[in-house]
């Protein structure tokens, strides 16, 4: 059987869909459930031996569902390999039934010692295997289960999670009260969308995948709920430019923002648009911010103190980005009103979103790029409610406001006008610094100006931005990455021949 792979499929599913994939494999294609359980446990054990080859003492922490069955298979494999292994059972093992009960019986026949978890704070193991909860968890963890998870997290042992870290919402990536913090997670049959957004990346560690050798037809009748997105190396907008090209062929981005004291934000957005290939970039900013913006000579900067001054600039633009450093004063509000009067495609960010939340509008030709706080204002919720189900939030913003929506954060989501939501699995915590959102605004605007439809501009822009952030972090670490550190990497990434 093949080893679980770190090369992950693009398709992501909700827990209910994965259960249906499992049902089709068992009931329609006739693969015994115990066969799939055995393959899953064996796959986890191969990862354990590969990642921790010196480990001699293994503790498997099991719950009372099918996830526990996978854990008993891991224990049986470890026992057969001569390792010192024991199983700690959280909850009444008598509740096990079906394949999970069979897996427990087979493990005990092979000499695996299983006993009730009794509040152990020390596990005496080199590696812990988390097989407490699977994808069916839909309420906060409590009681002995909560205590066991806290103990696992407090131990010095690395943790390998079976299918999903216990306590993590499979559909949302939210922590349900508490959750195992694993160093690695092996997921089966279909990747769960919650592994890759909200708290998912922090709890899962490295995610590996095994399809359990189910035939491809299992997936034919179920459309993924989301798709992992990456930079499309074959996209037409990345093709080398024609030798006779001129700047007029690559669009004109107008960036509107930069209230007094916030000129840096609008300048960064403008620079990002220029570095990503926009033919021309104009900046309309508050007169007090003009010196900051004009210090970048390639940007055509105008100080605007009244909204009617925007008209000639909008007339020349092909895409307008509005919001970086805009502020929520009378000046910012008037600038946004003037921008919204145009039919040009828009990229809307930052305070433009906060202003929009007060008087929601709807249009098809804009990209909205909220972070969770801005999304909360747009939907009149709390940021915690947004993070509790980012997939539902991004869809509700699109329904209420239209266009394409980018919900930023760990595992940024892109909801277009049709098809599954896109999820970017790149990026890093070093990008949690002032100005990186302004850079993204400029990136998306530049791609739209060069002819990308807004859905493509948003998806590819998010991936460009994330990969540039990863390259910047690789140079010296995540802490201390500045937004402008992304700019040279963006330039290389939009020129495919120079990527290596």
Image (spheres, helix red, strand yellow):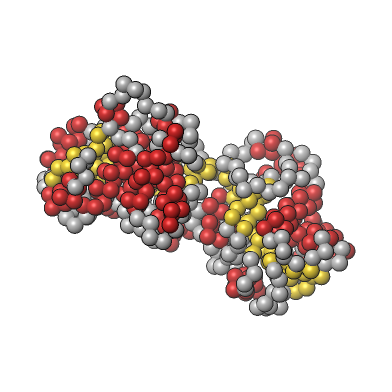
The extreme top residue here reads: 244
Q: Position of residue 141 (x, y in %)?
A: 59, 68
Residue at 53% x, 43% y is: 228
Q: Position of residue 368 (x, y in %)?
A: 35, 45
The spot of residue 46 in percent (x, y) is: 73, 54
* Count of numbered circles on the image: 0
Q: Residue at x 27, y 28 (%)?
A: 247
Q: Position of residue 356 (x, y in %)?
A: 28, 49
Displayed quadrant of residue 176: bottom right
Residue 430 visible from this viewpoint = yes
Image quarter where the N terminus lies is: top right
Q: Nearer the viewer, residue 370 or 50?
A: 50
**Residue 432 falls left or right of residue 80:** left
Q: Is residue 66 above or below residue 307?
A: below
- Position of residue 68 relative to residue 330, above or below, is below
Q: Write the residue at 57% across / 41% down.
A: 10
Kindly tell me whether residue 399 is visible in this rendering.
Answer: no
Left or right of 491, for residue 301: left
């Amino acid at each position: 059987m093949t080893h679980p792979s770190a090369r992950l499929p693009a398709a992501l599913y909700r827990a209910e869909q994965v259960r249906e994939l499992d049902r089709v494999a068992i009931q329609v294609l006739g693969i015994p459930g115990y066969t799939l359980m055995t393959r899953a446990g064996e796959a986890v054990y191969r990862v354990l031996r590969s990642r921790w080859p010196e480990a001699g003492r293994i503790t498997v922490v099991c719950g009372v569902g099918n996830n526990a069955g996978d854990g008993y298979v891991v224990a049986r494999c470890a026992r057969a390999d001569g390792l010192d292994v024991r199983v700690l059972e959280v909850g009444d093992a008598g509740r096990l039934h079906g394949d999970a009960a069979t897996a427990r019986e087979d493990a005990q026949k092979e000499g695996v010692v299983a006993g009730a978890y009794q509040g152990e704070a020390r596990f005496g193991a080199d590696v812990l295997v988390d097989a407490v909860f699977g994808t069916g968890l839909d309420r906060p963890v409590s009681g002995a289960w909560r205590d066991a998870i806290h103990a696992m997290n407090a131990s010095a042992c690395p943790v390998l999670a079976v299918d999903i870290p216990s306590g993590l919402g499979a559909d949302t990536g939210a922590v349900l009260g508490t959750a195992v913090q694993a160093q690695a997670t092996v997921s089966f049959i279909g990747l769960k969308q919650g592994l890759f957004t909200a708290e998912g990346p922090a709890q899962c560690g490295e995610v590996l995948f095994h399809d359990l050798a189910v035939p491809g037809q299992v997936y034919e009748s179920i459309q993924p709920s989301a798709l992992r997105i990456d930079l499309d190396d074959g996209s037409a907008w990345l093709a080398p430019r024609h030798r006779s090209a001129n700047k007029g062929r690559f669009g004109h981005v107008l960036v509107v923002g930069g209230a007094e004291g916030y000129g840096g934000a609008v300048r960064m957005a403008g620079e990002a648009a220029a570095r990503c290939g926009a033919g021309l970039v104009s900046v309309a900013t508050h007169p007090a911010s003009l010196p900051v913006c004009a210090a970048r000579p390639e940007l055509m900067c105008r100080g605007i103190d009244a909204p009617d001054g925007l008209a000639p600039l909008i007339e020349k633009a092909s895409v307008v980005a509005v919001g970086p450093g805009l502020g929520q004063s009378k000046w910012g509000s008037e600038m946004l009103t003037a921008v919204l009067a145009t039919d040009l495609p828009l990229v809307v960010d930052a305070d433009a979103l906060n202003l929009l939340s007060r008087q929601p509008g709807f249009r098809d030709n804009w990209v909205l790029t909220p972070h969770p706080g801005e999304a909360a204002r747009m939907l009149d919720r709390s940021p915690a409610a947004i993070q509790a189900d980012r997939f539902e939030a991004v869809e509700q913003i699109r329904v209420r406001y239209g266009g394409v929506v980018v919900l930023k954060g760990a595992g940024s989501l892109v909801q277009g006008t049709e098809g599954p939501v896109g999820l970017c699995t790149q990026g890093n915590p070093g990008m949690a610094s002032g100005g990186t959102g302004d850079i993204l605004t400029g990136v998306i605007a530049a791609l739209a100006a060069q002819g990308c439809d807004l859905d493509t501009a948003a998806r590819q822009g998010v991936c460009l931005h994330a990969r540039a952030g990863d390259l910047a972090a690789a140079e010296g670490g995540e802490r201390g990455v500045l937004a402008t550190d992304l700019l040279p990497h963006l330039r290389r990434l939009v020129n495919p021949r120079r990527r290596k």
